[in-house]
Image (cartoon, rainbow, N blue to C red):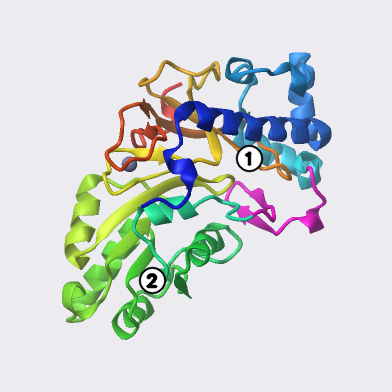
Amino acid sequence: MYYTEYETEPRDKRMKRKWKGVKEVLLAAERASGEFQARLRDLGACARDFKDWDDYARIPPLRRRDIVKWQQEHGIGWFLAARSGELSRIYRSPGPIYAPEGRGPDYWAWSEGFFAAGFRPGDLAQMTFSYHMAPAGLMFEEPLRDIGCAVIPAGPDNTEKQIEFLAELPVNAFVGMASHLKAIGEKARAMGLDPLEDFHLEKAYVAAEPLPESLRAEVEEMFGISVRQGYGTADVGCIAYECRELGGMHLSNYRHVEICDPVTGLPVPDGEVGEVVVTPFFTDYPLVRLATGDLSSMDLSRCACGRTARKLSGWKGRADDMV
Ligand SMILES: [Zn+2]
């Protein structure tokens, strides 16, 4: 089962659709983003000069540290193609960096990832990401509501309260960090509870930290659940997500993702390790080729789940360590 038809579309159709998304971002950025206008001036180019993916890959990536610096120098409006009041929310993440959220449906694009992880209408999910200032709590809650799940906005603190919710309510899904879920299970055991018998969890969606297979196995066994992870950032939301088959993370259908040389910013050959560079199809906060600082590689093999999107073969460190 799939959440949308995009998940199984042929690659050429997908790339045409993504090119349309990228072109809209380019035009919005050229029209309104002082940051992108500066990059175009450096290239001596205009948005219409970029005719294909090879042209697109010549645009130098945008670095997060530069966003931090330029937000302080120019204000957030310098990056926006909408007025601040036309956005949905503005978050602040460590950096410090402001992360605007526009008003489009499934803005952070996590819905397909949750669905691939087995989240379904009628699930009751305990949300343990923070709802305060940074985007994670709301970013991960909205797709759950989109799918038709109910959500307990538990936030990240107070392990004993988390255990109370799990024991007293029919919570069958957990959303948060795998290390946090492990700590909850350990505390529950110390309190004389058995996470297998006393809780009703069936699945967990985890993100925001590397997930070693040993940790996944430990948490799955502790609660008798399946654990699937999503990969993304506070600026762009979902970049890739796991399906039931594991073995990497399918690329989001709503972002253009490249694996690039961290020094030149140019794409590396398929299968080689490089920096994840992502373009979300945001037209109110256009981010053209945002360098994430994370290393991964592209896996072109066909997945048994039937999704046709390529996979990132896991998180392989930070680009700073490669340069
Ligand atoms: Zn798959």
**Element assignment for label 2:** loop
Query: Residue 284 sits in which quadrant?
Result: top right
Q: Secondary structure at mark 1?
A: loop
Is 12 rendered above or below residue 89? Answer: above
Q: Residue 9 in the image: x percent, y percent?
A: 46, 36
- Residue 281 is tagged as 1
* Image x and y of residue 136, in percent: 52, 58
The number of callouts visible is: 2
- When the figure is inspected, residue 260 is found, relative to residue 166, above or below; the finding is above
Ligand 1, by image quadrant, is: top left
> Does label 1 or label 2 sit earlier along the sequence?
2
Q: Which mark is residue 123?
A: 2
Q: Amino acid at mark 2?
A: Asp
Q: Nearer the viewer, residue 15 or 167?
A: 15
- Write the start and end of the magenta stretch as one range: 81-104
Q: Quadrant for residue 246, please give it.
A: top left
From the viewer's perspective, tell me whether residue 93 is left or right of residue 46.
left
Task: Please name the residue shown 26% across and 75% down the image.
Answer: 200
* Magenta region includes residue 299: no
Residue 187 image position (x, y, % from top left): 25, 73
The disc label shown at residue 115, or none: none
Q: Name the residue rendered at 78%, 20% in the picture.
A: 46
Q: Residue furthest bottom?
A: 168
Question: Disc 1 residue type?
Answer: Phe
Q: Compared to 281, does 94 lie above or below? A: below
Let me know if residue 242 appears in the view.
yes
Q: What residue sits 64% from the left and 35% below the top?
A: 21
- Residue 174, horizontal then vertical, whole percent: 36, 66
**Marks 1 and 2, how far apart in space?**
29 Å
